[in-house]
Amino acid sequence: MQKFIVEGGAALEGEVTISGAKNAVLPLQAATLLADTPMSIRNVPRLKDVQTLAAVIEGMGVAVRFDEHNNIHTDTRTIHTFTAPYELVRTMRASILVLGPMLARFGEAEVSLPGGCAIGDRPVNLHIAGLEAMGADIRVEEGYIRARAKRLKGARIVMEMVSVTGTENLLMAATLAEGRTVIENAAREPEVTDLARCLIAMGARIEGAGTDRLVVEGVESLKGVDYTVLPDRIETGTFLAAGAITGGRVRTLRAAPDTLDAVLQKFTEAGAAISSGEDWIELDMRGRTLRAVDIRTDPYPAFPTDMQAQFMAMNACSQGIGVVVETIFENRMMHVAELKRLGANIRLEGNTAIVAGMPYLKGAPVMATDLRASACLILAGLAAEGKTTVDRIYHTDRGYECIEHKLAGLGARIERVNA
């Protein structure tokens, strides 16, 4: 098992290029199942989750090829099975995204109940209820979701809570359903909008992308296209946080500033100077005092849950007291105990953390409990005195492409070692 050794004390300076969005490329990979001609996805990050989902669809018989630039090329004409097995799905909850496309195009799907980060309950009932409203016969047995439908029918679906993967699954299924489907209380995240844009390019008829009401007129078939993934807003925010927590200056290139309004506002509140252009964002913390900020996570366009842990690390090194409220996942405070090992002053009350900033943190061995917690601990290590050892970094590799190389390019002292 590999670890990161992080030596703190260096103010990060320079430019870093942002990769394609993890949370956008995964639904796009699932969407290739809808295409009856070859398809290509570009700006694909080199991530474990991308490889896992590629293995899932390849196991169904889809021809999958990564070229020298890591672009994905698929051809579904060789598909021969409609099962996503536990052996692959257990490591990643996004695997459930193949359910809707397979059912819509082939009339059947068998998908293992998914796994992934242990950050809270992400029930599949929203996916199942929506597909059943569209006429699917679904049984959950022996750890699998088994679904059948001659052809899905358009329906009005009111989602009882905002769900990104739920919205994406039902949106993909609706593209090939007979008639009109209306999805109310749909997720508005940029990654959902990116999927809608791709589906429209493939021939889908979708209105309302970027709003909480999606209207889909089903079509008979979709064609493969050449599509480029949008920049990763969470990776962008993480590198900007690295500049803030170390008192440096970081410019992110190939970024999408319009997807980060709530995060950039909080960076400004924290005392950073923020500037941006069409495809770049710069954070300058040199000579400035990092201030604690209050955070409340909520669905987009509010502050994203995927940036909560990184701001928790910032608050731990700030002046003042910041209150962090997590409303999306009930177990997404597991990094608090690890931050305390570095000397952070945090009091946890249910889904709320009260963080009193400390003059400094002290390096120590810590353990990543999930993907964003791993980024949080790396950031804290960059700001801490001495060396911090971050264990279980396989979580990091699920969502950050070559994070240690990108940080080193900014002047960070970080090394990946074998345990």
Image (cartoon, helix red, strand yellow):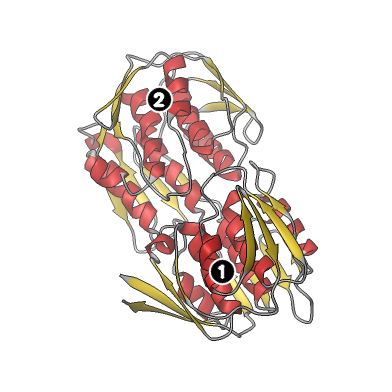
Q: Identify the secondary structure beneath mark 1.
A: helix
Q: Is residue 252 visible?
A: no
Q: Is residue 377 left or right of residue 67?
A: right
* Amino acid type at image mark 1: Lys
Residue at the location (51% across, 74% down)?
A: 406
The residue at which mark 2 appears reads as 221
Quarter of the figure with residue 240: bottom right
Say few, some or many: other residues with alpha carbon within 10 Å of mark 2 (under 14 / 14 to 19 / 20 or more): some
The residue at which mark 1 appears reads as 340
User: Quick one: quadrant of the N terminus?
Assistant: bottom left
Whole-percent x and y of residue 175? 47, 25
Q: Is residue 330 left or right of residue 36?
A: right
Q: Which mark is residue 48?
A: none
User: Quick one: quadrant of the C terminus?
Assistant: bottom left
Q: Is residue 277 left or right of residue 228?
A: right
Residue at the location (62% across, 37% down)?
A: 188
Say few, some or many: other residues with alpha carbon within 10 Å of mark 1 (under 14 / 14 to 19 / 20 or more): some
Task: Measure how far apart labels 1 and 2 are at the Cα level.
Answer: 54 Å
Nearest the camera: 11 or 354? 354
Mark in front: 1 vs 2: 1
Whole-percent x and y of residue 225? 44, 41
